[in-house]
Amino acid sequence: MDGTLLLAAATTFSFSLAIVVIAIPGLLRKMREGGMVGRDVNKSTKHEVPELGGIAALFGVGVQKIVGDIAEPPYLAAISVFFIAAMVGLIDDISNIPQRVKVVGVGFAALPLMLVHLGTEVPFPFGHSIALIGTLYFVYWLLLVPAGVTGVANAMNMSAGYNGLESGQIAIISTAMLVILLVRGSPEHSVIIMAALVGAAIGLYAFNRYPAKVFIGDIGTLGMGAALAAGIILGHIELYGIIAILPAFYEGFATFYYSQIQCVPDRRHACHHPIIREDGNLEPPKGAERYTLAYLLLSRKPMTEQQLVRTLLGLYSLAAIAAIILSFL
């Protein structure tokens, strides 16, 4: 492991974490003053919590360029991906756009990555790799990269909804990806991007965990999810990224099945309004037991919000550990 690269990653992480932690208190005050608050529907009190905390991540991840002499094109590409996806999230936070529009909109955020198109092969375990040549080169950059960016971003978005879950899962996945990038000696730009994302996610988690002082909003889940995909693609650790987000695949399949095939009209409302029992445990509404991974777990055993988030983050941790182990093979 390159000591210089490790130091750059640690410095970037520290700067990103510090900026988010410093920015959040002022952001909370402004959101309350501007009426940008949302009700915490998983609590019996239904109290209001400031939204759009993901804005702080934009500042945190933006410190990358001042740490190390990283190349301009990949840096600008990653930041552009983050900002475009975050703006789609901001529009959704304000106007609640349909899921299909978010999928397409975030797909366009991949354009900067398609323009820089860095890398000539995708590595696999046991020393295997796939060369990006000929037709496969165009298939990868024109089809798979946009699908990957919108897939990861929307997976992080669809998995959200509980105190500490969205920031926690991004922190876990990005940490695993950072470890893999460092161990494999990946390009500096991908390491720095991922280190900044880890710092921003952990900083947000400190305020987003139970009981949440801020919701990070779609601006955070879509923006940070897209940035996570950008770091994975620029570092060409796609396989390990897929493994690390495996729990989110259930959300994607369930969303597609119940919204496009079953055409359940009130699925979105049901997903955001679990039943709160007198003992504080949550359970899914009748008929919604398989709408989300959280509801599937709650249908087996009702839990408090804290217990549910710990269980879900535990699943992401297992997937992240599996990805790290596989990267050594």
Image (tube, rainbow, N blue to C red):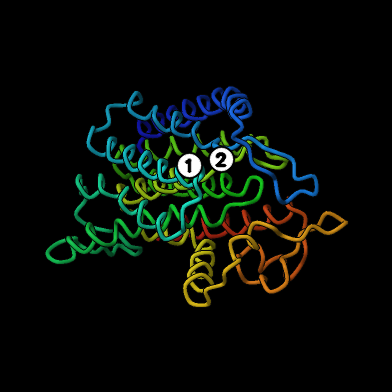
Question: Which of the image's four quarters has the N terminus?
Answer: top left
Q: Residues within 10 Å of mark 1 (few under 14, many from 20)?
A: many
Q: Tell me if 289 is positioned left or right of 247 in this view.
A: right
Asked whether the viewer can see residue 208, the reply is: yes
Image quarter of residue 58: top left
At label 2, the amino acid type is: Ile
In front of the other: 296 or 127: 296
Q: Position of residue 168 (x, y in %)?
A: 58, 46
> Height in image: 29 above or below 262?
above
At 38% across and 33% down in the image, what residue appears?
Answer: 3
Badge 2 element? loop
Q: Position of residue 243 (x, y in %)?
A: 46, 62
Asked whether the viewer can see residue 328, the reply is: no
At label 1, the amino acid type is: Ile
> Height in image: 28 above or below 52?
above
Query: Which residue is the site of mark 2?
Result: 216
Q: Position of residue 160 (x, y in %)?
A: 58, 52
Residue 219: mark in rendering? 1
